[in-house]
């Protein structure tokens, strides 16, 4: 390519290539971070590790780029390598998790290779621009286009990619994008490259296209290995991955691959969560449920005829939509989310609690475990203080609090936090009642009730149709064996978040 028009095309192509490779590199980083938070837990820690490993590897790649002889040829081979490794990132990790279980070493190994190759891209592009005499395209122009590509990727990932593609498909698609950049570069610089490079590129591109065509089949194979039962729903939203499985009459819900309920025993969890608080309050006309988008807690609340309204606040609107519209799922919650007394809001629990002027007789907190700082703040002194301002003086607030067996210190930290929260109705401390029950899907599981005013001792009366919770069950649930009894722990605050460490340490002892 020696004509003036062709020469003018080359700098433009290289800037376009800079934009495209910047997009794909950041997408791989986000895919790795999302996968690590799904499969390894603690999204903040995993995102931090992923960013650190990726940037460090990029720095190494920048340094190694000086040893590449031909900048054009090196750039093309880098794109082919990234296309193959980046495209295989999500499929490889999902298969490894399904069949091996442990993916940490593989994840960070693949991420390091992608980061190293990505670090070589900009120096090589800058060298090519210099070699072709594109003096007007300064290095800062290349960096500017690179940063614009990163911005586009960061916006596209949650808005366009996650809602419409599986992580497996997204990984392969952007692998094809890198291979497309390689192919375009081969064509534009064909006079500087050996003809045989087309063979390497063609084989890699054909392999990636075959993988893309079969990406959904790969997803099905992995899902079949990861989940024991037939999958009836598998969706990824901007907030989480949602999987619903079924075997005969048994249905299970998984969010980010963590079980949320099993219809064989969910009644134990939801009856324990809801009824001790509901049955022990003198008034329960207005009820607030934070979380509980599956409608199971609302189902239990509606067993009290004096309930006038339920406000259910869940962050992910897709969860509540599924459990309102999918006939099989609606049957599980007895149509609770379709009841005219139930108002469903898609909102952040903290933001809603801060903004609402409403006062409730019962507040039920059915939120995910405090496995990250983001979730830990919903188990903090500050959050509980906001909730108790929204609770009537004779009302009750109950929260699920994790396992006193698997995360003993974390459970008692929640208890300590509620006991340390300011009582808005009286100068005395809150009346706090810890209790637990056995749920086969989860193990020994704990809850905590907090009341501004202590109730006079009386026999608690539960609805007659409960499968599990009875007065004697309630009494025994307040007894803790020595190996799960109270420990000396700190209250949880957004300033320090000791709860996250308690939670991680507890579960690591049992399962890592």
Image (cartoon, rainbow, N blue to C red):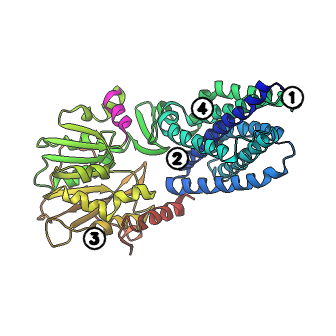
First of labels 3, 4 by sequence position: 4
Q: Pick the residue in front: 473 or 431.
A: 431
Residue at the far bottom: name it: 488
Label 2 belongs to which residue? 38
First of labels 4, 1 by sequence position: 4
Q: Pick the residue in front: 404 or 194.
A: 194
Helix, strand or loop under label 4: helix
How far apart are the two marked residues, 4 and 1, measured between alpha carbons? Answer: 34 Å
Q: Position of residue 395 (x, y in %)?
A: 15, 56
Label 1 belongs to which residue? 191
At a point 34% along the width and 66% down the height, the residue shown is: 480
- Residue 328, label in figure: none
First of labels 1, 2 by sequence position: 2
Which mark is nearer the camera, 3 or 1? 1
Picture quarter containing residue 318? Answer: top left
Does the magenta run of residues contain 325? yes
At a point 88% along the width and 27% down the height, the residue shown is: 195
First of labels 3, 1 by sequence position: 1
Which mark is nearer the camera, 4 or 1? 1
How far apart are the two marked residues, 4 and 2, measured between alpha carbons? Answer: 17 Å
How far apart are the two marked residues, 1 and 2, measured between alpha carbons? Answer: 46 Å
- Crowding around mark 4 (Cα neighbors within 10 Å: few <14, some 14 to 19, many 20+) is many
Residue 470: in sight, yes or no?
A: no
Label 4 belongs to which residue? 169
Q: Position of residue 393 (x, y in %)?
A: 13, 60
Label 3 belongs to which residue? 420
Where does the C terminus fall, quadrant-wise? Answer: bottom right
Helix, strand or loop under label 2: helix
- Which residues lie in the magenta part? 316-326
Horizontally, residue 239 falls left or right of residue 271, namely right
Q: In this rendering, is residue 65 above or below 476? A: above
């Amino acid at each position: 390519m020696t004509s003036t028009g062709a020469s003018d095309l080359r700098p433009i192509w290289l800037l376009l290539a800079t934009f495209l490779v910047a997009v794909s590199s950041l997408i791989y980083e986000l895919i790795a971070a999302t996968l690590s938070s799904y499969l390894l837990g603690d999204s903040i820690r995993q995102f931090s590790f992923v960013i650190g490993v990726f940037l460090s590897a990029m720095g190494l790649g920048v340094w190694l780029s000086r040893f590449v002889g031909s900048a054009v040829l090196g750039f093309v081979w880098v794109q082919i390598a990234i296309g193959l490794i980046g495209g295989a990132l999500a499929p490889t990790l999902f298969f490894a998790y399904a069949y091996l279980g442990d993916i940490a070493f593989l994840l960070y190994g693949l991420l390091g290779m992608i980061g190293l190759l990505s670090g070589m891209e900009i120096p090589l592009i800058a060298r090519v621009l210099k070699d072709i005499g594109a003096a007007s395209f300064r290095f800062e122009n290349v960096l500017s286009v690179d940063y614009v590509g990163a911005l586009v990727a960061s916006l596209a990932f949650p808005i366009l990619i996650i809602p419409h593609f599986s992580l497996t498909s997204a990984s392969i698609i952007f692998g094809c994008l890198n291979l497309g950049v390689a192919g375009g570069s081969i064509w534009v610089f064909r006079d500087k490259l050996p003809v045989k490079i087309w063979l390497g590129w063609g084989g890699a591109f054909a392999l990636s296209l075959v993988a893309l065509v079969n990406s959904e089949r790969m997803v099905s194979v992995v899902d079949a290995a990861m989940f024991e039962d037939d999958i009836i729903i598998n969706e990824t939203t901007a907030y989480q991955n949602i999987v619903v499985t079924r075997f005969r009459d048994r249905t299970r819900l998984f969010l980010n691959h963590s079980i949320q309920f099993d219809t064989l025993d969910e009644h134990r969890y939801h009856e324990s969560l809801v009824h001790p608080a509901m049955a022990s309050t003198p008034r329960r006309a207005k009820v607030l449920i934070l979380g509980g988008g599956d409608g199971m807690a609302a189902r239990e609340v509606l067993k009290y005829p004096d309930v006038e309204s339920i406000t259910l606040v869940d962050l992910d609107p897709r969860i509540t939509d599924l459990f309102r519209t999918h006939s099989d799922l609606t049957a599980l919650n007895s149509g609770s989310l379709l009841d005219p007394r139930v108002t469903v809001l898609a909102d952040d629990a903290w933001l809603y609690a801060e903004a609402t002027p409403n006062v409730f007789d019962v507040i039920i907190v059915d939120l995910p475990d405090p496995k990250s700082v983001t979730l830990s703040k919903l188990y903090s002194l500050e959050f509980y203080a906001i909730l108790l301002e929204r609770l009537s003086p004779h009302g009750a607030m109950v929260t699920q609090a994790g396992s006193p067996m698997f995360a003993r210190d974390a459970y008692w930290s929640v208890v300590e936090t509620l006991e340390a929260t300011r009582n808005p109705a009286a100068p005395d401390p809150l009346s706090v009642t810890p209790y637990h029950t056995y749920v086969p899907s989860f193990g020994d599981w704990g809850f905590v009730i907090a009341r501004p005013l202590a109730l006079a001792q009386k026999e608690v009366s539960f609805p007659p149709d409960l499968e599990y919770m009875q007065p004697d069950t309630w009494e025994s649930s307040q007894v803790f064996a020595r190996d799960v009894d109270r420990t000396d722990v700190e209250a949880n605050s957004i300033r320090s978040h000791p709860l996250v460490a308690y939670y991680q340490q507890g579960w690591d002892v049992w399962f890592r």
